[in-house]
Image: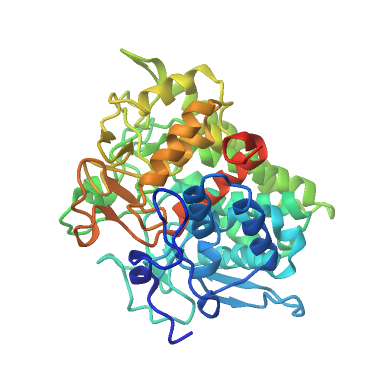
């Protein structure tokens, strides 16, 4: 594949044939010889869905986005072909950044989950991702992104000291939650619990629970008031405050709440208050899933497995109770809502950020039911101008965040809006906004300038022409609509 073009540049250019809709969206899949991983099962799904979608532009956007992870980001694999019997490994880059994020890579392959029972290589691709992530967590449970194994460790993203193999060491609790969620969903779909018997995976789980328990600790000793030591700090000289942390890297002070500190968000931006509520909600859900997985897989009666299952269940409950005790506030316009970040002392941050986990995604994550009244009030707030990071202009609307800056909405927020909606009209409106957010490229971007077509990458008005996670989530969303509300996208 040495003659294949760089996909970052390829994705910014228009390739024929154009779709037969009013937007005339280009065909952005690499030529077959340049695709990183091919599944005939996935190809048949693409054909089946696109042949029935009435909006030709929407069909093209799905055709480009759904296979984007397989087409462009499977950097390397070991033992993933059907005739090999060994422990598989899969290294998946995030797109235009040549590193593997735990959160991104888990989400990038989730749209293919329902089809892995029909494709052995695809199933092994999933299992290889689980094993690769487990190996990474055993290197450093606080890190969020990793270099390809055997790659030169001199390639680093920040000026902080990194362990060998680590690309970026930002403590983001949703990274570990994503690993647990991927393991659970793979097992729940296939019934394959072989990895639960593997020390690489079990050691990673042990490391996760140890780390999570450490990060429940408060800043001060409850009895003496003395400052407690911390296991993790992140401090560096930076031109943006979101790239370092308060108090020499330990973060703002917190009281014990049962929640887990997270010094960074899924946007890779620093938290203002360490109890990042959406991340804790996701962590609580996935610790519960982990407990179920371990309990039902413990046929041999392993004492270690039983202990880990019990610890996961206990921590999941502590986090959930902490959220309901410390992270619900009275908003003057919207009533009781979930806060985005808290510290346990009464300080709260009332915003939402586009990246998942977010407040908007709480029902998608499984933390609350979609009709939960506190969630619905929260949802109304974050999708309104009462959220300082909700932007609306002539070119689009949605939730953004400090990562890119004011005026840049992330199409991901409109995708999550669909995933958490029960309104046909709202879903159709969000689909239209997403379609127009590609700026004619036929791919989902990281963010879009909602006011004018300038700024962003190369002054194009958007950022990241190659952002696999957002494309994967869009593909997943179209499949959900096809299954639950086919009348919105298919002809009668």
Q: Is 364 in front, or is 249?
A: 364
> Which residue is farthest bottom?
2
Q: Is residue 267 left or right of residue 235?
A: right
Q: Is residue 246 left or right of residue 135?
A: left
Q: Is 251 in front, or is 46?
A: 46
Q: Is 119 in front, or is 283?
A: 119
What residue do we see at 36% from left, 65% from top?
14
The percent position of residue 452, horizontal first and vertical second, equals: 20, 45
Q: Which quadrant of the structure image shows residue 468?
A: bottom left
The percent position of residue 192, horizontal first and vertical second, equals: 77, 58
Q: Is 392 in front, or is 252?
A: 392
* In this view, 318 is above or below 458: above
The percent position of residue 199, horizontal first and vertical second, equals: 67, 66
Q: How is the image coloured?
A: rainbow
What residue do we see at 21% from left, 49% from top?
453
What residue do we see at 27% from left, 51% from top?
249
């Amino acid at each position: 594949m040495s003659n294949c073009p760089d996909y970052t540049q390829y994705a910014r250019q228009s390739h024929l044939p154009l779709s037969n809709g009013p937007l005339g969206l280009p065909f952005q899949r690499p030529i077959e010889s340049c695709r990183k991983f091919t599944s005939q099962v996935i190809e048949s799904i693409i054909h089946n869905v696109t042949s029935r979608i009435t909006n030709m532009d929407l069909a093209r956007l799905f055709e480009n986005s759904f296979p984007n992870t397989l087409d462009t980001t499977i950097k390397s694999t070991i033992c993933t072909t059907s005739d090999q019997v060994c422990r598989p490994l899969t290294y998946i880059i995030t797109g235009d950044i040549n590193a593997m994020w735990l959160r991104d890579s888990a989400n990038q392959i989730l749209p293919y989950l329902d089809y892995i029972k029909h494709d052995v290589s695809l199933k092994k691709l999933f299992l290889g991702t689980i094993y690769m992530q487990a190996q990474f967590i055993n290197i450093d449970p606080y890190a969020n992104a990793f270099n390809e194994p055997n790659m030169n460790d001199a390639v680093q993203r920040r000026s902080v000291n990194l362990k060998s193999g680590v690309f970026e060491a930002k403590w983001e609790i949703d990274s570990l939650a994503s690993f647990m969620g991927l393991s659970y969903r793979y097992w729940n779909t296939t019934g394959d619990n072989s990895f639960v018997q593997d020390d690489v995976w079990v050691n990673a789980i042990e490391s996760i629970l140890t780390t999570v328990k450490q990060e429940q600790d408060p800043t001060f000793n409850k009895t003496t008031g003395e400052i407690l030591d911390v296991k993790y700090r992140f401090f560096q000289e930076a031109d943006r405050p979101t790239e370092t942390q308060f108090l020499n890297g330990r973060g703002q002070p917190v009281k014990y709440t049962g929640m887990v500190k997270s010094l960074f968000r899924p946007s890779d931006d620093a938290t203002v208050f360490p109890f990042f509520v959406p991340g804790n909600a996701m962590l609580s859900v996935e610790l519960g899933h982990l407990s179920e997985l371990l309990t039902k897989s413990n046929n041999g009666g392993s004492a270690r497995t039983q202990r880990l299952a019990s610890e996961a269940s206990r921590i999941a409950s502590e986090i959930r109770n902490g959220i309901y005790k410390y992270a619900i506030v009275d908003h003057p316009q919207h009533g009781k809502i979930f806060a985005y970040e808290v510290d346990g002392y009464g300080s709260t941050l009332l915003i939402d950020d586009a990246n998942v986990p977010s407040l908007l995604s709480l029902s998608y994550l499984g933390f609350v039911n979609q009709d939960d009244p506190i969630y619905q009030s929260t949802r109304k707030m974050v999708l309104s101008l009462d959220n300082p990071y909700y932007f609306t202009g002539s070119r689009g609307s949605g939730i953004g965040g400090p990562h890119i800056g004011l005026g840049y909405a992330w199409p991901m927020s409109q995708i999550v809006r669909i995933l958490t909606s029960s309104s046909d009209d709202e879903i159709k409106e969000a689909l239209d906004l997403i379609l127009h957010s590609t700026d004619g490229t036929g791919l989902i971007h990281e963010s879009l300038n909602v006011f004018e077509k300038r700024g962003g990458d190369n002054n194009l008005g958007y950022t990241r022409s190659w952002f696999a996670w957002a494309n994967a989530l869009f593909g997943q969303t179209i499949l959900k609509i096809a299954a639950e509300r086919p009348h919105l996208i298919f002809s009668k």
